[in-house]
Amino acid sequence: MARYRAVAWTLFKTSRPSQLLLILAVYLFGAKIALANGATDSTSALVAGAVAILPIAASVHYANEYADYETDAITDRTPFSGGSGALARTGLPRTVPLKAAIGSLALGTVLTAVLTTAGVLPLSAVAVLTVIAVFGWQYSVGPLKLAWRGWGELDNAALGGLVLPVYGGAVVGGDAGFVALASVPFFLVVLLNLFATQWPDRKADAKAGKRTLAVQWPASLLRRCYVAIVILAGFVLLVLSGTVLPRIVVLASLAVAPLLVWGAYGYTKRHVPWPTVSAMVGLLLAQMAGWCWVAA
């Protein structure tokens, strides 16, 4: 009985429930952008989209826990990096999250097929969800294994900062191009988050052969890139202001600027990347509030 409890606890932890909640928030963020731009509100479609994305996202997390078994076992974990730590704590084999990944992917595929057949999930949303599933898995596992080759940061940021909001917009029949363009500032901050959260794992990743940018690049180059991305995010925010982004959304976004400056100041020197993580979550909430104000 104790083993069953250990397996259940491990499956819960390796699904990364806090990240699943964040994924739901980003999904709704994309849907809200589309609704503010004239898409048709549909509760049934929004529920269907959430039901389809959750097992797919969980499968990606399980696959990542399986692939990062070696590096997670030797890293100095933080609340934002180093995986869930569940396998190291319970001593269960890495096949546990692998089997869960395959099962979750199969469940998500079946649910997506059923919801599409029932007419509550548009084919355009299914196409975007397929991209999320394919490149979410390829972040960790072969043949691409992007995170191990220095492409993981861009892949993860693109999926979480651009493709996921587009999926939310597609579920309600929104303009994919508009949602993607409106999500660019958020995407850039998600990319900063990846830079920050990869840094604490760099030594363990290097030992395991995982060649993230934090492993490949010197600290000075990483810091310059961080600052450049912060500046680019601010520039894009200003360029899109009043056209794609309503001014209330732009003004709300400025609230996280001090966190980004603080994150830049301590990047590669601070072990726990909480300023950048807080900036990412804060920007999501601030922009979501702004879009809700517009769509009210």
Image (cartoon, rainbow, N blue to C red):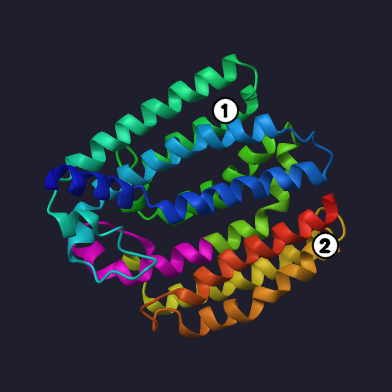
In the figure, 146 relative to 194: above or below?
A: above
Badge 1: how crowded within 10 Å, few (<14), some, or many (20+)? few
Query: The magenta stretch spans which residues?
Result: 191-213
Question: Within the magenta stretch, is there residue 211?
Answer: yes
Does the CB distance between marks 2 and 1 fall below 8 Å? Answer: no
Q: Amino acid at mark 2?
A: Ser
Q: Quadrant of residue 210?
A: bottom left
27 left or right, relative to 155: right
The one nearer the camera, 197 or 212, is 197
State the quadrant of the N terminus.
Answer: top left
Q: Name which of mark 2 and mark 1 comes first in the sequence.
A: 1
How far across and how far down the image is residue 213, in percent? 38, 63
Residue found at x 44% / y 70%: 196
Q: Which residue is mark 2?
A: 241
Q: Amino acid at mark 1?
A: Ala
190 left or right, relative to 82: right
Q: Which residue is mark 1?
A: 127
| Helix, strand or loop for disc 2 | loop
Seen from this angle, which residue lies furthest front? 1
